[in-house]
Amino acid sequence: MVAANAAVGYNTQKTRMQEEKIPQMKLFKKKDLFLLGALLLVAAGIALFYLLRPAGARAIVTINGAESQEIDLSKDGIYQIEGAALPVTLEVREGKIRFINSQCPDHLCEGFGYLDSEGEYAICMPAGVAVTISE
Ligand SMILES: [Zn+2]
């Protein structure tokens, strides 16, 4: 009888401990969900920031390494670059810029395609014209 009572007492205690643990675990899960939600909000904010950022971006055009002009990438347009060894044309479209209709023999500059991220660049070696995206 004594042994059986002890066993029952032990079981009761164990059950109570489990009951105490469950709400605690639920609290932790809620906290995790909250943290996850907060992280998602931050990630969404960063993604929005990067999506909207091209509106303020500029392209710096250099001729033979010297800064020639700045182009605002928020305005679509065609830019003839004056003063280069060869006539070079740049096209701005939807916050991106690229070489088009180049008169150079290799057309490698056109192969760079659109640039839209800070630090990206394209260069036309025969004309000596380089384009870099800046903030
Ligand atoms: Zn070229």
Image (cartoon, helix red, strand yellow):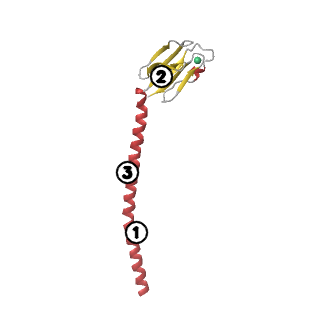
Quarter of the N terminus within the rendering? bottom left
Quarter of the C terminus within the rendering? top left
Do labels 2 and 1 touch, CB within 8 Å?
Answer: no
Q: Is mark 2 on a helix, strand or loop?
A: strand
Residue 92 in picture, x, y percent from top left: 47, 20
Q: Which numbered mark, 2 or 1, is in the foreground of this view?
A: 2
Q: Is mark 3 on a helix, strand or loop?
A: helix
Residue on which disc 1 sits: 18
Residue 42 in picture, x, y percent from top left: 40, 42
Asked whether mark 3 lies closer than 8 Å to ligand 1, one says no
Q: Give the label on residue 75, or none.
A: none
Q: Which of 3 and 17 is in front in this view?
A: 17
For disc 3, the neighbor class at 10 Å (few under 14, some 14 to 19, many from 20) is few
Q: Which numbered mark, 2 or 3, is in the foreground of this view?
A: 2
As displayed, is residue 35 above or below residue 2?
Answer: above
Q: Give the label on residue 60, or none.
A: 2
Cα gap from disc 1 to disc 3, whole angstroms: 24 Å
Q: Which numbered mark, 1 or 3, is in the foreground of this view?
A: 3
Residue projecting furthest to the right? 106
Is residue 1 among what the camera can see? no
First of labels 1, 3 by sequence position: 1
Cα gap from disc 2 to disc 3, whole angstroms: 44 Å
Is residue 75 among what the camera can see? yes
Instruction: Look at label 1 and name its amino acid.
Output: Gln
Q: Is mark 1 on a helix, strand or loop?
A: helix
Instruction: Look at label 3 and name its amino acid.
Output: Phe
Residue on which disc 3 sits: 34
